[in-house]
Image: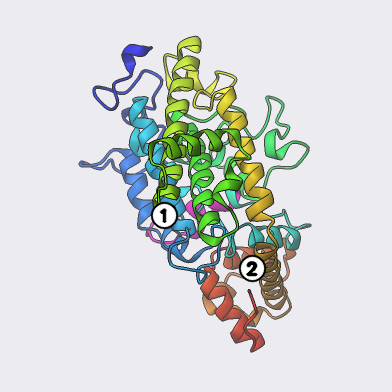
Amino acid sequence: MEGQIGFGIGPHAAFAVDPAASRGRLYPEPESPTRTPYQRDRDRIVHSTAFRRLKDKTQVFLFDTGDHYRTRLTHTIEVAQIARALARALRLDEDLAEAIALSHDLGHTPFGHAGERALDRLMQGHGGFDHNAQSLRVVTKLERRYPHFDGLNLSWEALEGLVKHNGPLVDAEGRGVGAYAGKTLPAAILAYAAEQDLQLATYASAEAQAAAIADDIAYDAHDIDDGLRAGLLKVEGLREVDFLRDIIDEIDARYPGLEKPRLVNEIVRRVITRMIEDVIAEALRRLEATAPRSADQLRHAGRPMIAFSDALLEADKAIKAHLWHNVYRHPRVMQVMTAAEGVVQRLFERYWNDPDALPGEWRRELDVGDLDRRARRIADFLAGMTDRYALREHQRLFDASPDLG
């Protein structure tokens, strides 16, 4: 297995997805003479309307809090960079890993997880709302750019990675597992699975697994950065997490008295580097033990191959717990997010009670008699909004600008 690692030098590893053997697209298209299927997927995602809207969608801090905080777009770009670095080191298909990373948050609502919570409550009884399922809905239905099909008509491998990057959705008997344990799968996933089998009971490709763990690495690192910038975290407070304390001690020993902006950047840089190096080393251990000879064998390995070591997994959990208590649940953040949930709820209720309040193109396909389809149409419209547009709609419909702190 070690002979297959060359940091991007040489052919793909045996367990990487082979672009020449793609399972194709739901709607067959002629092959591109200049791009692989996954390069084409990546390009379609980058040129999509949903991707552009990510620039004005909240990651943790609202778009108008400051120019230097992450948005959903800058987070996505950071995830793609890390996913590509992992793919290169492990000789995976970099373009597929990047495409999955770039698409993973296309279904996110305005105001981050606050908007998602509000929409999920409002959609109870109508199939619920799940941002991962909504991302699939965006790329298979809601984007309307091509004359012969709705969506982006991405490759099977890109769609599989988008849906399953966090692991299987069901067991061999079709029962929900992981985040869907004891639940019915989201309607968008079930609807698409009826058209194209994405093998929901298996793990996704190594490329999708790289994108998933890149997401963890990116938001651990940048939420530390943004939390420090916002004053919700203190450098000394980070020492409560052993992994971070060791990094801070190393920096202090090497660069005593380092000014805060450089200190923060060095902390973030070392967090990312250490996590990436750990994932590569752990992936090599797992791949050597399992020895998959194809992407399909890797999908059936029974556990993820691209993962943190046990020690880094505990560090990741400790960082997330620290961020949960000190950033995500901080009273300042909670006040804003509670107000943001109210914005989404009021907009939904207004569109539900007064469909004429919707823009014309959204009214045209609104079936007011089918309550589930009516609710889903409103949820699609709301989920696609940026923070800025949602606030403008609130002002238009209620003649009031909500106070988001």
Crowd class of label 1 (few under 14; some 14 to 19; many from 20; radius 10 Å): few
Q: Amino acid at mark 2?
A: Ile
SS class, disc 2: helix
In this rendering, the count of numbered labels is: 2
Q: Determine whether, in the image, residue 16 is placed left or right of residue 391.
A: left
Magenta-drawn segment: 133-150
Asked which quadrant contains residue 146, the reply is bottom left
From mark 1 to mark 2, how far is it between C-alphas?
A: 43 Å
In screen coordinates, is 16 left or right of 64? Answer: left
Q: Position of residue 112 (x, y in %)?
A: 59, 59
| Residue at 61%, 45% in the rendered image | 189
> Circle 1 sits in a helix, a strand or a loop, which is it?
helix
Specify the farthest residue to the left.
34
Q: Residues within 10 Å of mark 2 (few under 14, many from 20)?
A: many
* Nearer mark to the viewer, of 1 and 2: 1
Look at mark 1 in the image and give the residue it sits on: 261
Q: Residue at left 53%, top 51%?
A: 223
In the rendered view, would you say 205 is above or below 363? above
> What is the basis of the colouring in this image?
rainbow
The C terminus lies in quadrant: bottom right
Label 2 sits on residue: 378
Residue 143 colored magenta?
yes
Q: Decide whether residue 15 is among the magenta residues.
A: no
| Residue at 52 percent of width and 30 percent of height | 204
* Depth order, front residue of 167/371: 167
Residue 131: x and y, percent? 60, 52
Q: Is residue 384 above or below residue 352?
A: above
- Report x, y in % for residue 97: 40, 37
